[in-house]
Each structure stands twice: as structure tokens, then as C-alpha cells.
Amino acid sequence: MARVTHKRRQEPKPETPLEWLLREHLESLSVRGYSEHTVRNRQVHIGFFIQWAYEHGLREPVEVTRPVLERYQRYLFFYRKKNGEPLTFRSQHARLVPLRVWFKWMTRQNHILHNPASEIDLPRLGRTLPKNILSVQEIERVMAQPDIREPIGLRDRAILETIYATGLRRLEIVRLKLFDLQLDRSLVVVNQGKGKKDRYVPIGERAVAWLQKYIREARPQLAIEPDDLSVFLTAEGEPFSRDHLTAEVRRHIVAANTGKAGACHLLRHCMATHMHENGADIRFIQQILGHEDIKTTQIYTQVALRTLQQVYAATHPAALLETDPTASPPATASPGSEDLLAALERDAEEDREEPE
């Protein structure tokens, strides 16, 4: 079976000065080493504003004043998605921050004399506790959904186990290569994760066993040449896209009938929450998840890899090959959990392609 190739979509030619300046700004971000994901998100969020400005007869950067940006901020507040729901304050925040960066760049590049976004007040971001964290028993029900007698089912079980065991972001799962797996050491190497930083992540015995079974029995049936060594492959033998991975994980969570919605990030969130509830220090979870900091004023604390693995083995519900799915973590969270949950919530928003 020949690998399907997709032609790169041609970017439309900018038509207004604002569109030209956006393209120039995105190029400057790429030159300065920002990831493709970050550049694309900036393009999407600033593009929303440019479209709104065009509809209001604004095409030149000098036509954008502070009152104009305040009008746009009010527009975001009253905006309703296709399902009738408003944008969350975090989504509004995500659309406004790139604008502030863009106008600051335009000022420094002398495209405008004054930065109209310098004094814009951003929405305050509240910290809400998660409403749909799965219990350990519910996690086990999700894990039991794939039909492991089939290659696709065995692959899906390995995906679910890996996400819950490691807490990797969905983009990190999609990019995972065979040579990133150090299963004999119970480690996964994340190359060029968020912020273009590498890290080691512990992985439990149970997930290792499912990964080895998938790689040995199912992956050879899915792989086609040329094989780019991506760990997880679609039925067509291609690497997953983020949306495809989300759809597969969500399908099994829905099938488990837990009454709770979510996909990849839900499993990442559950992993961090369960470890924290079982007594893991927030600094260790912080390093596993790849968060530089939990509070903006908190300095990142490096911890030894061996100690990290010991804490992981002692606190992750599925760290060992033989686990008791009926054992429940304590119901109360320890100090620092709100900071952890806030960081995970930021993660979810940043990982989202765009609000509906």
C-alpha cells in the first residue's frame, strides 16, 4: 500500500497592510526559533482580529487604537460559539495576548509610533477545580474498551496506557518515535517538547508491557514503507494527526459510559491528579508533565531522575504490572493542587487548535 501524500495548502496572498504585517511577524517568530505549533496558534488568534477589523473597515495598523481594541474585547465577551456557549475567559485571554505581542513588535519595528495594546486589561483567569476527573476504577473501564484481539484495538490499548502512564501531551504522543522508548529503563524520552525542551518521563510496568505487546504483535501489521518509526500508526500505516488521536481516545472514553467527557488531556489530567492525591510532591509531577513552573513566581526545581522514578512508582496507580483497580486515592487534595490544576488547565487551552 502506497503512503498517501498530502499537498501543502498554499497560503493566500495578504491583501491588507495588517495581513502583510502579520505575515512578517510570523516570519520573525520562526526565525527566532518559536515552534511551528506556536506560530500557527499566533496566526489563528491574530487572524480572528484581522477578520473582525476588516469587517469594520480597518485595514491599516494606524487605524487600530485603544478604543478599537476595547471594542474587540467586548466583542469577544459577547461572542457565542456554534453551540451557543460563550468563549471562556481563558479563550478570550488566548486571543488577546498574541495581539499585545504583535502590536509591541510593530512598535519596535517602527510600523506604528504608539502601541495601542500596551494598556489593555486582560481578562482575569479564575482557577476552577476539574469537574470530570475519572476515578481509578473509571480509568480501568476506559482501558478495557479496545478489542485487544485486533491490531487496532491492541494499538488503542497501548495508546491509552501510555498517555495515562506518562501524562504526555497529545502532540508529544503523535511525535513519539521508536527510538524515544527506553522501555528497559522504564523511561520515555520527549524530544523537543513544549518550549523545544527535552525531558525524560517515567513509564510504569503495565504501560511498558502493553507497549511491548503492541510493538511486537500489532505495529508490524500496520507499518508500511517508508516507515518513519512513529510509535503509533493509523490503520493506513501513517502517523497520527492530533485530531485523529483525540477522536480515537474520546471514542473509548465515551464507550466506557463514565458520564464524563474528554480525550487525551483528560487522561493527562487524571494522571497528575491521581499522583498528587497519592502524595507525590508537586515538583515531581511538574517535571514529568514538562511544566517549567506552576506559579509564575516559582523557580523551577530540578530533581534527580532516580528519585523521580521512585516517586512515580510509589504514587502512580498504574505504575506496576499488577495493580488493584478497586483501590481509590484519597478524596482530599494536598496543598498545591490548585496550582497544579491551573497549570493543567492552561495546558489544555494552549493545546486546543481554536475555540469553536
Image (cartoon, rainbow, N blue to C red):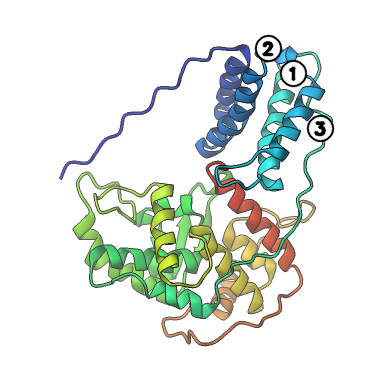
Graded by Cα atoms within 10 Å as few (under 14), some (14 to 19) or many (20 or more), the crowding at tag 3 reads some
Q: Which SS class for mark 2?
A: loop
- Disc ID at residue 120: 3
- Identify the amino acid type marked 1: Val
- Identify the amino acid type marked 2: Glu
Residue 199 place in picture, x, y as percent: 54, 56
Graded by Cα atoms within 10 Å as few (under 14), some (14 to 19) or many (20 or more), the crowding at tag 1 reads some
In the figure, residue 293 lies in which quadrant? bottom right
Graded by Cα atoms within 10 Å as few (under 14), some (14 to 19) or many (20 or more), the crowding at tag 2 reads some
Q: Are marks 3 and 1 in contact (CB under 8 Å)?
A: no
Which residue corresponds to mark 2?
60
Q: Distance between the residues labelled 3 and 2?
A: 19 Å
- Identify the amino acid type marked 3: Ile
Question: Is residue 351 something one can see in this rendering?
Answer: yes
Q: How far apart are marks 3 and 1 (CA)?
A: 13 Å
Which residue corresponds to mark 1?
64
Question: Is residue 202 something one can see in this rendering?
Answer: no
In the figure, residue 212 lies in which quadrant? bottom left
Residue situated in front as seen by the camera: 76 or 245: 76
